[in-house]
Amino acid sequence: MPVHVVWDDPDEKTVVRYELVQPWDWESFHSAVERGWKMALAEGRRTDIILDFSAAGRIPPDAIAHFSRVMRSRVDARAGSAIIIAGMGERYVFVIDVVSRLFPRLAPNIYRVPTVEEARAILFTVRRRRKQTIPA
């Protein structure tokens, strides 16, 4: 049940991308999240996340519970990191809405876009904004 975790930017190692490919299940998702977390920790700096659902197909049952579990376990560490959900169909928008409400500290940094390319464009904008707000 494939959920791949890769560096979206292998040279810089600042964006962890999860590729969910049908068929997948929550066990493989949680395993991939742990691998991605270890990759990020090894770099010792903030990493942003792209969740690519473009090939995911149907999301398994209990999505809100599973996404909440991941957010809850990393809420402090993820504060300030962009979390971009790409390719998630309209029928699952409510899942992201509910999870955003459950984790208001993370909500301003959660984005939903149609494609991975648009996710990268959002990251470019977010990172430019971060640089502008860093005190001298």
Image (tube, rainbow, N blue to C red):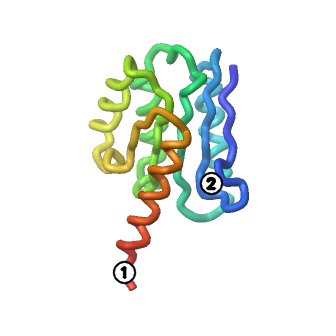
Q: Which residue is mark 1?
A: 135
Residue 57 position by quadrant: top right
* Left or right position of 5 against 73: right
Residue 21 against residue 36 in the figure, above or below: above
Q: CA distance from mark 1 to mark 2?
A: 25 Å
Q: Residue at x 45, y 31 (%)?
A: 67
Q: Position of residue 78 (x, y in %)?
A: 46, 52
**What label does residue 7 carry, if any?**
none
| Amino acid type, residue under disc 1 in the picture | Pro
Q: Few, some or many C-alpha atoms within 10 Å of disc 2 (few <14, some 14-19, many ≥20)?
A: many
Front in this rendered view, residue 40 or 133: 133
| Amino acid type, residue under disc 2 in the picture | Ala
Q: Residue at x 54, y 28 (%)?
A: 53
* Left or right position of 125 against 52: left
* Quadrant the C terminus occupies: bottom left
Q: Which residue is mark 2?
A: 40
The secondary structure type at the circle numbered 2 is helix
